[in-house]
Image: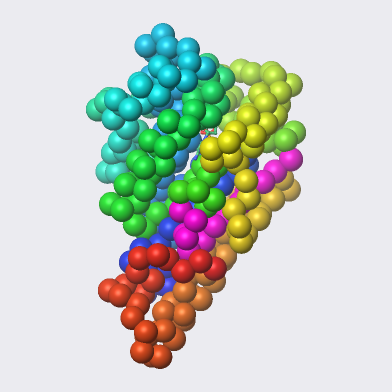
Amino acid sequence: MSVVAAIAEFIVTIDGPAGTGKSTVAHRLARRLGLEFLDTGAMYRAAALRALELGIDPADGERVAALVRDLEIRFDWRCDPPDLLVDGESVGDRIRTQEVTRAVSAVASNPTVRAAMVEAQREIASLHPRLVTEGRDQGSVVFPDAHVRIYLDARPEIRARRRVEQLATKGIVTCEAEVLAQILERDRSDSSRRDGPLVCPHGADVVDTSDIDIDDVIDRLESIVRERAGAALRNAHRTQSSGGNVGGSACGDGATAP
Ligand code: DC
């Protein structure tokens, strides 16, 4: 059995700015390690989409907060990647449009929205405790005790080019300069908000993906995760043999930080 499979509750957080390849990396890493995958950006996008559909200004903090309090955001975990359902309806690619991308920062900077999302993400982890989760605040706020905390970064120009190419595969033509401006604005807004700002979590492994291809990024993350999982197991065995109580699983509740 692999070291990761031997740990009953195992959370890997991947944070970083837009366009570092987080979603793809997190999804493929999860598959490789036999863990589940949580895309938290999709949850914020779903809230932004619903606001737009209902004609609510995404910057209208009170109305968006009230909307999100009533919203049921769930994943269908039978699909791979899990399908996002809002009030029971699959949102599909409607959360990836430019309009939603433009609206989402205002929604994500709303403290009431963030509190609801943090709670929903912890609830998901209690039901799916073997998880790779990606976003902006996963290692810093939502799961600060995760076994592995990764921060992915890349130069803004590279991130803009990747976004343009990604949208092109979906038939969406965009201007690279405009996407770069959007990315810089989103970085500024994500990093400067008071609640859950984009920061490198304490003790995180930083991986710059600017000049590495995606397969190499995943290989690197896999080796970091396996190393951490091995260390956590060795710690748990040491605690056990010195008479400590490690609970029902190797790393149990309150996962050991690296
Ligand atoms: O990763 P993404 O582009 O799908 O994220 C969409 C937006 O949601 C982006 O503005 C950052 C925000 N977000 C956040 O504030 N916290 C998270 N955990 C995930 C995303």
Please say which color scheme the image uses.
rainbow
Would you place residue 67 above or below residue 41 in this image? Answer: above
Residue, far left: 88
Give the extent of the magenta segment: 143-155
Check the picture and name the quadrant holding the C terminus. Answer: bottom right
148 relative to 16, above or below:
below
Task: Tell me the residue at 63%/50% (across/down).
Answer: 200
Rendering coords of residue 213 (x, y %): 65, 49
Name the residue rendered at 38%, 35% in the picture: 116
Q: Measured from the top left, where is residue 127 in percent x and y?
A: 28, 52
Q: Is residue 28 visible?
A: no
Counting from the top left corner in percent of width and height, residue 7 is at: 37, 69
Q: Which residue ends up furthest to the top in the rendered image?
A: 55
Which of 115/238 is in front? 115
Q: Is residue 34 left or right of residue 214?
A: left
- List the single residue furthest toward the bottom: 242
The residue at the point 67 percent across, 26 percent down is 185
Magenta-span inclusion, residue 152: yes
Q: Quadrant of the N terminus?
A: bottom left
Residue drawn at the location 57% of the way across and 65% of the way down: 224
Q: Do we see residue 106 in this rendering?
A: yes
Q: Against 25, is 224 above or below?
A: below
Q: In this rendering, would 173 be left or right of 80?
A: right
Image quadrant assignment for residue 35: bottom left
Is residue 72 magenta-colored?
no
Q: How many marks?
A: 0
Residue 99 falls left or right of residue 84? right
Of the pair 81 and 123, the residue shown nearer to us: 123
- Give x and y (percent) for residue 26: 50, 49
